[in-house]
C-alpha cells in the first residue's frame, strides 16, 4: 500500500483497508484485489452478497405459524441474520434480526396464521454484514392448511347459488368445485367487468369452495372472479361471471342455479282493437324454473328470430302485446328466463290482428258453425250421424253449415233445414227462420261453379235468415275444390273469386225484392280447402282482396288455434300445426260489419284428446259474434 494514515481509536488506514485490533478489514465493496501481503497481515473480508432466498416449507401449530427459508451458502459468511415483518417497507429499516442462524436454512416461528409476511436474509461475519437478499413475500399457513410444492390447479365455473335482499343491502352466495392443492380461495368482486382483473387485494379470502358476499347495492351489476391459492401463490382464476344484486321486488321470486326448461307451444288466445292500436294476447304452459318471460314480436318469420331486445317482459305465462298495426300478420316467440339466464325459446307462432269491427249497438249476438261431415267419401255415416247430431245439440249454434252432407237427410232434434243437399244449412228452431220467398225472388238456393282449370268443387248453398230479435243474415255455405296441384289451386282461386261475385249479386237481388235484407250481413261458411300456412295458394288472398276476413283473425278470443280442423286419419290425438294453425274450415266475415267475440275448434275433447267415436274427418268450427 502506498498510503498509511493513523485514525482515531488507534486504527490505521492503509489504502482502502482498515486495521482494527490487529486485524485488517477489507470491505466487500472495494474494487482493489486482496494481495498475499494482506492475507499475511490477517485481513478479514465481509461476506459476499446473498443470492436468492426461497421459502422451502411451512406449517401451522398451536404456537403459531412457521415458515422455513433456504438459500445457497454465501462465501465468507459465518452466520445469517433473518428479518421477518408483515410490513413490506419496514424490512430495510430493521436493525435487529428476527432470528440468526449459522446454517443455510432457518425456521421463523411464532407468526400469525393466514397473514402475508416479508422476509430478507443478510450474511454476517466478524467484519460485519454483507449485502442482503431481495425481499420475498409469503402467506403463512392457517390451521388445517397444507404445504405444497406446486401451485393450485385452475378454478372451475363459479355459480351464484343463492342471493338475497335485506334493508342493510343485498348478498350473494358463491359456490365452485374444490381445487387441487388449494389452501384457500381469493374472491374478487367489482362493479367493473375489467377492473376485477386489476384488483390485488381480494374482497374476501375463504378456506372452502364457497363464499357469501354481503353489502352489495341492490340492482347493481357485479363481476366476480375466484382464484385458488396456497403457499406458492394463486392458481389460474375462474372465468368472470356477472350478477345483478337482488332488489326488494326480486324477493318475490325463487333463486335458481340452472336455466329454465325450454318454452312450450305459444297459443294466441285473444285480440282487441284499442285507441293505441291492435292487441294480441298469447298464452303458454308454465316453464319450470322460469321467473320471467321475454316476448318478441315482429312482422316477419325471420325478423322475430333476429331480435335481440324483447318487445316486453312478463312474469306470468301470458302476455297482451299492445300497440300493433291493424290487419297485420305478427310472428311471436317467447323465451323463459331466470337469474341464471335465458332458456330455450319457443317455436315462432303467428296470427293476424283484427282489421276492423262494427259497433254493437242494439244487435244481438249469436253463433254460427261450419262442419264438413264427410257423409259420402267417409264410411259409416249411419253410425256417425248420432255423434254429429249430439255435438250440434251440445253446442247449440243458431246456424249450422254442413259440407259433404248428401247422405245427411234428417235434421237433429230442435233444428230444421233451410237448405238440404250437398251443402246443408240448418237453423235452430225458435232462434232463426228462413225469410219467405217473394216476387219470384227465392231466399235460398244453390250454385255450382264452372270447371275452368280443373273439375269444379261442390259449389255453394245459401239462405236468407231472420233472427228472433228481428236481425237478418244471409248465409253462404261453400265447399271449394280440393287438391294441391297447380290446376286445382288455380280452380280454387277462381271459385273463390266467383263466390265473392255471386255473394254480391245475390245481396243486390235480395235487397231489391226484400227491403228488410238491404242491410243484412252476409257470412261465408264452409270448407275452403286452404289454410294460411299453405305456400303458393292465394285462395284466401282472393277473398281478402274482395273485402272478406277470416273470423279466426277477427276473433276477440280463440280456442284450439293449433289443432287443425281437418283430421284425415280421424285420430283422437289432435293434429297440430305450429306456426299458424291449419284450418281449411272457415267462417268469413265483413270486418266492418261484425264483432267476432269468439272462434273455437269445437271438436269435443277430454284430457287433451278428441272424444271418440268421431263424427267426421273434420272438426266443427264454432264462431260467436254480432253480425250487422
Image (cartoon, rainbow, N blue to C red):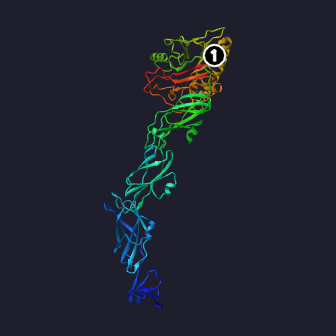
Q: Which residue is mark 1?
A: 520
Residue 219 in the image: state x and y as whole percent.
50, 44
Q: Is residue 18 visible?
A: no
Residue found farthest to the front = 9
| 277 horizontally vs 116: left or right | right
Residue 37 in the image: state x and y as whole percent.
41, 90
| 246 horizontally vs 447: left or right | left
| Element on which disc 1 rests | loop
Q: Residue at x 49, y 45 (%)?
A: 218
Residue found farthest to the bottom = 2
- Along the line of sight, the residue nearer the viewer: 315 or 267: 315
Task: Name above or below for residue 612 compared with residue 142.
Answer: above
- Along the line of sight, the residue nearer the viewer: 172 or 236: 172
Task: Name above or below for residue 180 compared with residue 367.
Answer: below
- Along the line of sight, the residue nearer the viewer: 297 or 27: 27
Residue found farthest to the right = 512
Task: Name above or below for residue 485 compared with residue 12.
Answer: above
Residue found farthest to the left = 62
Please count the marks in the image. 1
- Along the line of sight, the residue nearer the viewer: 369 or 381: 369
Position of the C terminus by quadrant: top right
Residue 254 in the image: state x and y as whole percent.
44, 39
The image quarter in which residue 483 lies: top right
Residue 612 in the image: state x and y as whole percent.
43, 22
- Category of crowding for the residue at label 1, using alpha-carbon neighbours closer than 10 angstroms: few (below 14), some (14–19), many (at least 20): many
Q: Is residue 68 visible?
A: yes
Amino acid at each position: 500500500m502506498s498510503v498509511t494514515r493513523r485514525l482515531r481509536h488507534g486504527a490505521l488506514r492503509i489504502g482502502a483497508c482498515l486495521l482494527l485490533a490487529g486485524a485488517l478489514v477489507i470491505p466487500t465493496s472495494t474494487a482493489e484485489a486482496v494481495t498475499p501481503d494482506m492475507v499475511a497481515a490477517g485481513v478479514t473480508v465481509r461476506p459476499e452478497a446473498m443470492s436468492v432466498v426461497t421459502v422451502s416449507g411451512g406449517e401451522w401449530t398451536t404456537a403459531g405459524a412457521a415458515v422455513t427459508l433456504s438459500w445457497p451458502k454465501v462465501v465468507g459468511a459465518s452466520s445469517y441474520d433473518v428479518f421477518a415483518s408483515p410490513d413490506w417497507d419496514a424490512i430495510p429499516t430493521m436493525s435487529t434480526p428476527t432470528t440468526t442462524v449459522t446454517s443455510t436454512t432457518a425456521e421463523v416461528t411464532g407468526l400469525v396464521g393466514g397473514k402475508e409476511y416479508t422476509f430478507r436474509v443478510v450474511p454476517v461475519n466478524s467484519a460485519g454484514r454483507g449485502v442482503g437478499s431481495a425481499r420475498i413475500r409469503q402467506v403463512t399457513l392457517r390451521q388445517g392448511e397444507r404445504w405444497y410444492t406446486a401451485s393450485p390447479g385452475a378454478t372451475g365455473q363459479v355459480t351464484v347459488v343463492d342471493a338475497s335482499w335485506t334493508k342493510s343491502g343485498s348478498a350473494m352466495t358463491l359456490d365452485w368445485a374444490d381445487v387441487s392443492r388449494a389452501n384457500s380461495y381469493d374472491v374478487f368482486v367489482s362493479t367493473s367487468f375489467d377492473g376485477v382483473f386489476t384488483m390485488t387485494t381480494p374482497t374476501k379470502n375463504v378456506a372452502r369452495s364457497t363464499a357469501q358476499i354481503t353489502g352489495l347495492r341492490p340492482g347493481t351489476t357485479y363481476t366476480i372472479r375466484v382464484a385458488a391459492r396456497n403457499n406458492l401463490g394463486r392458481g389460474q382464476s375462474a372465468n368472470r361471471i356477472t350478477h345483478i344484486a337482488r332488489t326488494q321486488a326480486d324477493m318475490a321470486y325463487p333463486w335458481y342455479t340452472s336455466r329454465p326448461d325450454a318454452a312450450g307451444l305459444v297459443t294466441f288466445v285473444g285480440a282487441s282493437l284499442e285507441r293505441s292500436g291492435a292487441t294480441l294476447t298469447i298464452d303458454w304452459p308454465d316453464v319450470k324454473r322460469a321467473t320471467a318471460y321475454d316476448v318478441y314480436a315482429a312482422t316477419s318469420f325471420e325478423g322475430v328470430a333476429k331480435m335481440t331486445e324483447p318487445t316486453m317482459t312478463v312474469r306470468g305465462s301470458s302476455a297482451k302485446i299492445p300497440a300493433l298495426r291493424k290487419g297485420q300478420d305478427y310472428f311471436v316467440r317467447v323465451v323463459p328466463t331466470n337469474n341464471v339466464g335465458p332458456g330455450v325459446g319457443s317455436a315462432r307462432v303467428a296470427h293476424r290482428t283484427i282489421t276492423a269491427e262494427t259497433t254493437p249497438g242494439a244487435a244481438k249476438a249469436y253463433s254460427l258453425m261450419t262442419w264438413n261431415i264427410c257423409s259420402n267419401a267417409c264410411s259409416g255415416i249411419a253410425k256417425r250421424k248420432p255423434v254429429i247430431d249430439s255435438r250440434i245439440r251440445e253446442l247449440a249454434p243458431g246456424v249450422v253449415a254442413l259440407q259433404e252432407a248428401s247422405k245427411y237427410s234428417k235434421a237433429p232434434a230442435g233444428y230444421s233445414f233451410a237448405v238440404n243437399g250437398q251443402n246443408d244449412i240448418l237453423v235452430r228452431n225458435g232462434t232463426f227462420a228462413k225469410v219467405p220467398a217473394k216476387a219470384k225472388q227465392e231466399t235460398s238456393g244453390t250454385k255450382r261453379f264452372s270447371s275452368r282449370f280443373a273439375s269444379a268443387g261442390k259449389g255453394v248453398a245459401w239462405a236468407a235468415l231472420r233472427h228472433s230479435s228481428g236481425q237478418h243474415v244471409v248465409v253462404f255455405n261453400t265447399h271449394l275444390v280440393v287438391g294441391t296441384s297447380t290446376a286445382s289451386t288455380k280452380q280454387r282461386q277462381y271459385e273463390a273469386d266467383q263466390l265473392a261475385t255471386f255473394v254480391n249479386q245475390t245481396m243486390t237481388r235480395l235487397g231489391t225484392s226484400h227491403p228488410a235484407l238491404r242491410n243484412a250481413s252476409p257470412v261465408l261458411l264452409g270448407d275452403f280447402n286452404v289454410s294460411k300456412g299453405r305456400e303458393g295458394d292465394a285462395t284466401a288472398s282472393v277473398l281478402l282482396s274482395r273485402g272478406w276476413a277470416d273470423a279466426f283473425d277477427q276473433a276477440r278470443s280463440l280456442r284450439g288455434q293449433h289443432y287443425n280442423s281437418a283430421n284425415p286419419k280421424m285420430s283422437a290425438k289432435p293434429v297440430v300445426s305450429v306456426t299458424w294453425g291449419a284450418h281449411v274450415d272457415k267462417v268469413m266475415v265483413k270486418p266492418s260489419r261484425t264483432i267476432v267475440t269468439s272462434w273455437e275448434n269445437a271438436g269435443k275433447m277430454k284430457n287433451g284428446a278428441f272424444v271418440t267415436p268421431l263424427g267426421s274427418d273434420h272438426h266443427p268450427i264454432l264462431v260467436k259474434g254480432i253480425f250487422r
